[in-house]
Amino acid sequence: VVERWAPLRGSAAMQSSDFSFEVDSEGWGVVRARRNFEYEVIWPDGSKFGPFKKKSGEVADGHRYDDADYHPAGLWQFSTDREIVCIAWNWETKWSDMGVENKMKQRTPKMKRIPANHWGISGKQLRELAYQVEQHFADSDDENPNVYTVVEKLIKPLCRDSSSSYALLVNPRGLKCDTFVTHAWRERFLEFVDSLMEHYSDFETRVFWICFLANPQTWSPDELSNLLGPSALQSPFVIAIQQCETFVVVRNGIMNMYSRLWCVAELVLVMAYASAKVEIIGKMPARAKRVGSNIGLRAECSVTADKVMLLDTIEETSC
């Protein structure tokens, strides 16, 4: 996506997550957007030109304002679903003192308006998602993918336009959870769903808090870090654990889930801060490690910052 605006007279090259700003050989300012975007011009008297929506790959018409007596100043605002960039234009300075302001759109308030223990999905909705997975991967080499694959190939594409979690995509007003689910992403997704379906006679109406469905998967690491907070004790995980009546451990046939640090932390947190009933389901094969260098406090974590936070939280909780 390319948008040209009034000629620049100074240096204004800039990069942001979604936009690049530069001056071309003819002296025109050029905005290149990496995502679908919208823009408008706001004049000093409050009147507006636009907004205009542009799709990825579309070249927008250039606009030129050469009359110094007409609109001597203005504010160009470019936005994607996650970012707003403002360019302040003053004709007298010929762009030489152009101000560029880059703001990340605040997506966390929407999540925070709905309590974390309402980021749930019903058993019926989980069964329907399992059906989608079966259909989506029916012709692939992996008909029973793990959670990592389901997130990348199905959950992220479904949620990208809404910038929401899957749970809030299907339940925009939230759905109060009664069962917190702790599990490992390397498990086979359909095996995971089957374990829950076989264990609960009220599976269809039970409401589950499942991390990869409760938390937004399309957000940047910085946005997720802001959502989770500086300590696991302030995170949506703990809020949900404290409010749910049941804490269910879903083992799998692939690995010992306590080789994953998040699983270790969740167990520590429920024992320390919640009164939920703890249930253990699923089968862990004999070949799965029960002790070793990567179990418990030596468990692995994909994100270094999360590992530091979780180990600090576990130490704090154990004191």
Image: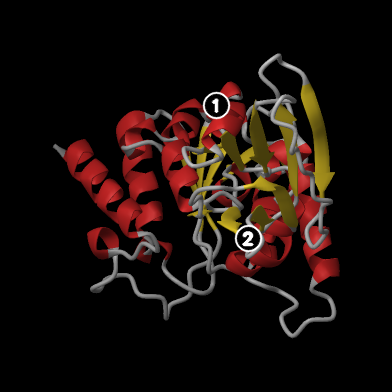
Secondary structure beneath dot 1 equals helix
Q: Is residue 202 visible?
A: no
Query: Residue 116: percent from the left, percent from the top?
Result: 54, 30
Q: In this view, does 107 lie to the left or right of 99?
A: right
Q: Is residue 239 depicted above or below 83 in this figure? A: above
Secondary structure beneath dot 2 equals helix
Task: Please identify the quarter of the rendering in which residue 27 is found.
Answer: bottom right
Q: Mark 2 points at which residue?
A: 192
The colour mode here is secondary structure
Name the residue type under label 1: Lys
Q: In this view, does 104 lie to the left or right of 315?
A: right
Q: Is residue 146 depicted above or below 27 in this figure? A: below
Q: Is residue 236 depicted above or below 54 in this figure? A: above
Q: Residue 240 carries which label?
A: none
Tell whether label 2 touches label 1 (CB within 8 Å): no
Q: Which mark is residue 112?
A: 1
Query: Residue 318: percent from the left, percent from the top?
Result: 18, 40
Q: Is residue 20 visible?
A: yes
Query: Residue 273: percent from the left, percent from the top?
Result: 34, 30
The quarter of the image holding the N terminus is: bottom right
Q: How far apart are marks 1 and 2 (CA)?
A: 28 Å
Query: Residue 142: percent from the left, percent from the top?
Result: 71, 80
Instruction: Identify the residue at image location x=82%, y=52%.
Output: 60
